[in-house]
Image (spheres, coloured by chain):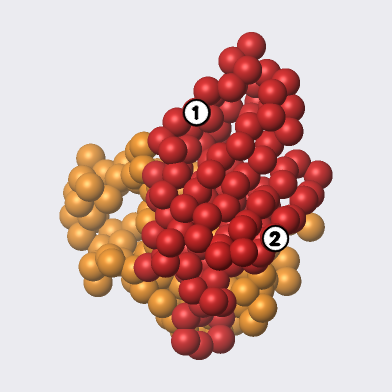
Amino acid sequence: DAGVTQSPTHLIKTRGQQVTLRCSPKSGHDTVSWYQQALGQGPQFIFQYYEEEERQRGNFPDRFSGHQFPNYSSELNVNALLLGDSALYLCASSLGSSGNTIYFGEGSWLTVV
Amino acid sequence: LAKTTQPISMDSYEGQEVNITCSHNNIATNDYITWYQQFPSQGPRFIIQGYKTKVTNEVASLFIPADRKSSTLSLPRVSLSDTAVYYCLVARRGSGAGSYQLTFGKGTKLSVIP
């Protein structure tokens, strides 16, 4: 039973570019959330997807957008990258209807230069 | 948001029991309490979750008093490999199905000393 998987694990982008990060939820899970974790800080909630719709959103600008596919996988897109977007991006999944235990992936390290 | 407060750091010797207390004064009726462990450069790993009283699993116990305004994570007989950051969170449901979020604080950095 695969857990939450994310890709890529590491990437380097230039300021102003766009990036897409991908997440496959744990088998049987239908809800995906994305978090940003800067070095030395706790993860910060970006948004959550359920039934292919954004259900909740944290305090992040519109440059951060996402998508959930019919197979429950998800993408996080960040446009017009800033140096401050450098962080570990974490995907978390759960079975949304029951608010069950939330599992995290190992994250995607994004460095903006 | 369901804010939590926990000690920034703790030290413990190997083999000792470690208790990390977290306060969550504005916890709501439908919220539940979850603890995660995170090693450097890895995603948070679920430890334990509870709503009230006591919950125990193979790695930890979680004590929640009746007013639910605090909780205590208990790690029995810690080892060096338990050195990590421990996050106390309140999972809060939103208004619709599949709608809830976790609010992370800064966590407690536990250092286990040989």
**Residue at (59%, 22%) from the top-left corner?**
B12
User: Going from the N terminus, do you reach mark 1 or mark 2 first?
Assistant: 1
Residue A8 visible in the shown view: no
Mark 2 burial class by Cα count in 10 Å: few <14, some 14-19, many 20+: few
Please, what secondary structure does the residue beneath circle 1 have? strand
Q: Chain of mark 2?
A: B
> On the picture, is A62 further left or further right than B71?
left
> Seen in the image, is A67 located left or right of residue A70?
left
Residue that appears at 41% across and 35% down: B8
What kind of residue is marked 2?
Answer: Thr
- In-front residue for pair B93/A76: B93
Chain ID, mark 1? B
Q: Please rate how many residues cluster around mark 1, counting C-alpha atoms within 10 Å: few if below 14, some from 14 to 19, many from 20.
A: some
Mark 2 — residue?
B53
Relative image position of residue A27 (x, y in whole percent): 72, 66
Do discs 1 and 2 belong to a common subunit? Answer: yes
Marks 1/2 in contact by CB < 8 Å: the verdict is no
Q: If the image is split into quadrants, where does the C terminus of chain B sit?
A: top right
Query: Which residue carries the number 1 mark?
Result: B10
On screen, A29 above or below B82?
below
Name the residue located 52 percent from the left edge and 55 percent from the top edge.
Answer: B70
Quarter residue B55 falls in? bottom right
Residue A71 drawn at (x, y percent): 63, 76
Judging from the image, what secondary structure is the residue with disc 2 in?
strand
Q: Residue furthest top?
A: B114
Q: Is residue A79 visible?
A: yes
- B81 above or below B7? above
Spot the red chain and give its letter.
B
Chain A on-screen colour = orange
Q: Nearer the viewer, residue A67 or A45?
A: A45
